[in-house]
Image (tube, helix red, strand yellow):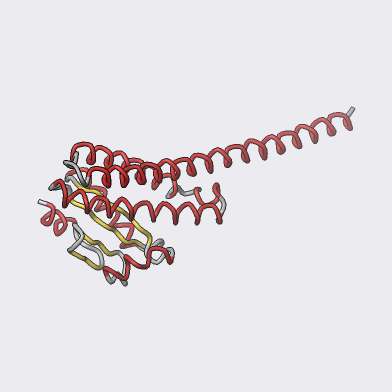
Amino acid sequence: MNKQIYAATLLAVCLAFVFGVIVGGSYRGRQIDEVSQFIKNGELTTESYVLEQELLEGLDTNCNLAKARLNTLSNDLYQLGKLLSGETARQDLGETQYRFLKRKFHLMQIQTYVLYLKLRKNCNVESHVVLFYFSRQNENSTLQGRILDSLVQEYDLRVFAVEYNYSSELNFIEDYYNVTVTPAIVLDYEKKFEGLVDESVLAAQLS
C-alpha cells in the first residue's frame, strides 16, 4: 500500500514537472511571438510612413496624418520598450533572441527619431524630442530616466532611450553626437547634455 502511495506521489510530481515545462515553454513561445509581432508591426508602420511621405513630397504634405501615424508608432515603441525592459525579459526570451530583438528595437527607435526630425521641418511641429543614452547598472542613468518620465507627463515630449554602445549598427549616431559618457541627452536634435541633468534645467529648456 505504501509503495502504491509512493509510486502515485512520484507519478504526480513527474506529471506536474512535465506540465510546468510544457506551460513554461508555451508561455515563453507566446512572449517571443508577441515581441516579434511588435517588431514586425513597427517595421511595417515605419516603412509605410516613409513611403507615404515620399508620395506626398510632390503634393501638399498632410501634416495631420503624419502626426497621427508617428504618434501611433511612438506608442507602439513605448509598449515594446517596456516589454523588453522587464525584469525577466532576458530570461524569458533567451539571450540570443533578446539581444537580436533589442537591437532591432533600437534601430526602429532611431528610424522614428529621424522621422520626427522630418516632421518638425515640414509641419512646424512643436513637440520636443529627446535622444537619451543610458547604461545599465548605472545609478545616474536610472535617475535620469525617472526625471525624463516625469517630464513626459507634463510637457509635449518624445523620448527615445537607447542603451549606449549596445550594437555596432548604432555607433554612427553616437559618433555624430560625440556621445562618450552616460547618461547623455540630445534635446531637439541640437542641444547635448552630458552627465545627470537636473529636472529644473530640462524643464527650463522645454518651457
Q: Residue at x 38, y 63 (%)?
A: 170
Q: Quadrant of the N terminus?
A: top right
Q: Decide which of 107, 136 is in the foreground and name it.
A: 107
Number of labelled discs?
A: 0
Instruction: Report whether 8 appears left or right of 119.
Output: right
Residue 164 falls in image quadrant? bottom left
Q: Please determine whether, in this image, residue 200 is positioned above or below residue 74.
A: below
Residue located at (13% from left, 53% from top)? 206
Q: Nearer the viewer, residue 170 or 16?
A: 170
Residue extending farthest to the top is: 1
Q: Residue at x 43, y 66 (%)?
A: 168
Rendered view: 169 above or below 28: below
Q: Residue at x 24, y 55 (%)?
A: 130
- Residue 153, by quadrant, is top left
Left or right position of 44 against 92: left
Q: Position of residue 88 (x, y in %)?
A: 50, 48
Q: Indicate whether 50 appears above or below 95.
A: above
Q: Could you tell me residue 115's position as x and y percent?
A: 27, 51
Quarter of the image holding residue 20? top right
Q: 84 or 106, which lies in front?
A: 106
Measured as percent of width and height from the top left, residue 205 is found at 12, 57
Give the residue at the far front of this rendering.
Answer: 58
24 vs 81: above or below: above
- Give percent across and percent down for residue 48: 35, 42
The answer to whether residue 101 is left or right of residue 120 is: right
